[in-house]
Structures are given as structure tokens and as C-alpha cells.
Image (spheres, rainbow, N blue to C red):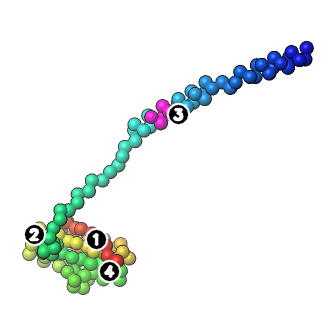
Amino acid sequence: MRMRRHSSEVHESSHGIDLAPMLDFVLNLLIFFIITAIFVKEVGLDVNRPTQMNQSDSEGSSIQLQVLETSEVFFNNRLVDVRAVRANVEREKALKSDIGVLVIADKKAQTGVIMSVVDQVRLGGIYNITFSTSN
């Protein structure tokens, strides 16, 4: 009798593992990922690239402001104080109303000085500001 019980127990365990719960779980995961993928929105920024200009056109149409690592500010290759930027910008704007500003900042220049220069330019009435880095 012992042999029969043992052989019947082996026969019952050889049916295998029930895969239905695992398949239900995988199906639920698939549905979850499909639904969440639908609601993902890509965030982007549109960039308007400037058109190519000749060097002679760009010289007369913009003011160059350089901010060095030592916090010195150059207005059209002339050393000025940060507080004098506004007056110089207003004078140049009076001569040419559609003028822009090119701020060339050293990579190691202090951000506070750069922002002070930009604030002075905006107070001077020019909002067309382009940024560039040097070194």
C-alpha cells in the first residue's frame, strides 16, 4: 500500500505549474505601460536660428559688450563701469533705433555681473540681446 500512495503523489505533482496567475500579471503590466505611454508628453523648445549675415552688416547693427573674468566691462572695446552701460546704450539707441546688443561673456565671468550688464541694457531700452561666450 505504501507504494501506491507514493506513486499517486508523484503523479499529481507532475501536472506542472499553473501559469494563469503569471499571465494575468503580465497582461496587467502590459496594459499599464500602454496607458502610461499614451499620457507622456514631450517637452520641446523651438529655436529660431538667425539668418546668415555678412560681417559688414553685423558690425554696424549691434553693440558689443564684453564681460571679463575680472568683472571688467567693455562697451564697443572701451572699458566702462557697469553703471555707465545704460547711458551708453541709450546714446547708441538714439543714433540707431533698431540696434541690438551682443554680450560676450568669459566662461569664468561672474553671473551677477553679466546679469547686471543685461539689466542695464534693458533699462537703456534695448531688448534684442544675443549672448556669446569666450575662452
Is residue 125 at all visible to an observer of this figure? no
Relative height, residue 102 to residue 19 (above, below): below
In the image, what residue occupies the spot 40% across and 37% down?
Answer: 38
- Secondary structure type for disc 2: loop
Q: Are marks 1 and 4 in contact (CB under 8 Å)?
A: no
Which numbered mark, 1 or 2, is in the foreground of this view? 1
Which marked residue is nearer to the observer: mark 2 or mark 3? 3
| Front position among marks 1 and 4 | 1
Cα distance in 3D space between marks 3 and 1: 48 Å
Q: Which badge, 2 or 3, comes first in the chain's sequence? A: 3
Residue 119 left/right relative to 59: right
What is the spatial separation of the Cα atoms under label 1 and label 2, in whole angstroms?
Answer: 22 Å
Quickly name the residue at label 1: 132
Q: Residues within 10 Å of mark 2 (few under 14, many from 20)?
A: few
The Cα atoms of the two marked residues, 2 and 3, are separated by 62 Å
Q: Are marks 4 and 2 in contact (CB under 8 Å)?
A: no
Evaluate if marks 1 and 2 touch, with contact meaning CB atoms under 8 Å apart: no
**Based on the displayed image, in which of its 4 quarters is residue 52 positioned?**
bottom left
Q: Which segment is the magenta one?
A: 30-34
Instruction: Identify the mark at residue 29; answer none if there is no mark.
Output: 3
Depth check, mark 4 against mark 2: the one in front is: 4
Q: Quadrant of the C terminus?
A: bottom left
Q: Position of residue 64 (x, y in %)?
A: 21, 76
Q: Is residue 12 above or below residue 89?
A: above
Where residue 123 sits: x, y (%)?
A: 21, 70
**Residue 85 figure quarter:** bottom left
Residue indicated by mark 4: 68
Instruction: Examine the structure image and report whether residue 33 is included in the region drawn in magenta.
Output: yes
What's the residue type where badge 4 is placed?
Answer: Leu
Question: Is 35 located above or below residue 79 in the figure?
Answer: above
**What secondary structure do most residues of the magenta stretch adopt?**
helix
